[in-house]
Image: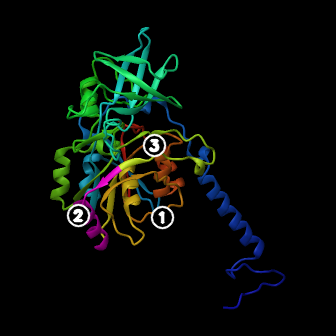
Amino acid sequence: MRLRERAGSKVSPAGERPAAEYAEGLAARDNARSAEFTLSTYQYDLPPDLIAQQPVHTRDESRLLRLDRHTGTVDHHAFKDLPRLLRPSDLLVLNETRVAPCALTARKPTGGRVSLLVLDPANRGHPRDSNESASRVCIAGSSKPLRAGATVTVENGPEILIEKTLGQGRVLVRFPVGEEDEDGVLGFLEKYGTAPLPPYIRAGDNAESFHKERYQTVYSRISGSVAAPTAGLHFTRELLEELKKAGIRTARIVLHVGPGTFTPVREEDVRRHVMESEYYEISRESADVLQTAMEEGRRIIAVGTTTVRTLESALSAEGRIRPGRGKTDLFILPGHRFRAVQGLVTNFHLPGSTLLMLACAFAGTERVLNAYKIAVGGRYRFYSYGDACLML
């Protein structure tokens, strides 16, 4: 095709606009793309009183903002409306990880308080030999740094040993469990640990038993996470049954949420942020259900960003869901080509978080940030115990 020329002007490669105008268009596009990789793009104003401190009384009574990711249109619902907002052919994918009670309080011999968050509590994907099965990396908080070889006493429990200091506030801790202890470190945590609530939630006194169960999905099954897959907190068993009756099937996967999900992004160019890997599993049965849905052209709706990262990580170059176990450090930013997921149920995330960036990659940065602005104006509740957003 010959390029059309205008009098006195060179034309763009597309043959539609003068070269200067075409170059300006390219520059504007590149500037927009550059902004999507800038941390400040993902900041927004949130009144502190919109940070949910408690969940709603009944899980599915939380609010649900629906965002059309193609048009940016927003409308408002209750979470229990989900069966009529989805198609009967849709496949919901749930992360059935269970949050381990992996927060510990301990005391130094001097009486000083020590807080520990046990990472990878289930030791998934690691050899369980006699040298490693009782040791875990922990994020430690204390007035003075802990030293290798020191012991601290768990509140209402035994002494534990600080084996190594690892830097960046992390230590390797050996727990007093042996090979004969069937439940190992997880059993120890069930006895002495508490729910690892995010720091922005003030648990209050005598609330431990409440949060230990409420900070779980009703379908949680396999212990190993240090934080809840919060999009799933809105489901009740009754709602799952209603979805089933509506013809909406479910598939189950596991991703054990680790520190990589909630580690703050500190690089202004967000592409320089490195995600820590997290363990996931997809059974042969779930892989087959997912593959069938893909081949039939049915929508796959991921419940939570953890589910998105699992499915996108497990998809082969040929477009097949691979069953099995693995680790993923996938960091999803705008520009990512989603191949496994066509819908997302998610909560409202912290400013500047990798979770917010994933949501923007899925539904468009401008559209998502505008939806957040509408949610703030409509006084939706934010973060882990807050309301939900459905992006389709």
Badge nearest the viewer, 1 or 3: 3
Q: Is residue 7 left or right of residue 14?
A: right
Classify 150 as above or below 342: above
Q: Is residue 292 magenta?
A: yes
Look at 38% across and 70% down and name the residue there.
319
Badge nearest the viewer, 1 or 2: 1
The residue indicated by pointer 3 is 260
Q: Secondary structure at mark 2?
A: loop
**The quarter of the displayed image where residue 302 is located:** bottom left
- Residue 30 image position (x, y, % from top left): 66, 61
- Identify which residue, 101 or 40, lies in the foreground: 101
Report the magenta stretch's main SS: helix
Q: Residues within 10 Å of mark 3 (few under 14, many from 20)?
A: some
Q: Is residue 302 magenta?
A: no
Q: Residue most toward the top? A: 110
Q: Residue most toward the front? A: 130
Q: Secondary structure at mark 1?
A: loop
The residue indicated by pointer 2 is 88
Look at 18% across and 59% down and name the residue there.
246
- Identify which residue, 197 or 254, lies in the foreground: 254
Identify the magenta region: 280-296
**In the rendered structure, which amino acid carries the disc numbered 3?**
Gly
Q: CA distance from mark 1 to mark 2?
A: 26 Å
Is residue 341 visible from the viewing direction of this image?
no
**In the rendered structure, which amino acid carries the disc numbered 2?**
Pro
Mark sitting earlier along the chain (1/3): 3
Q: Is residue 360 left or right of residue 178?
A: right
**In the rendered structure, which amino acid carries the disc numbered 1?**
Arg
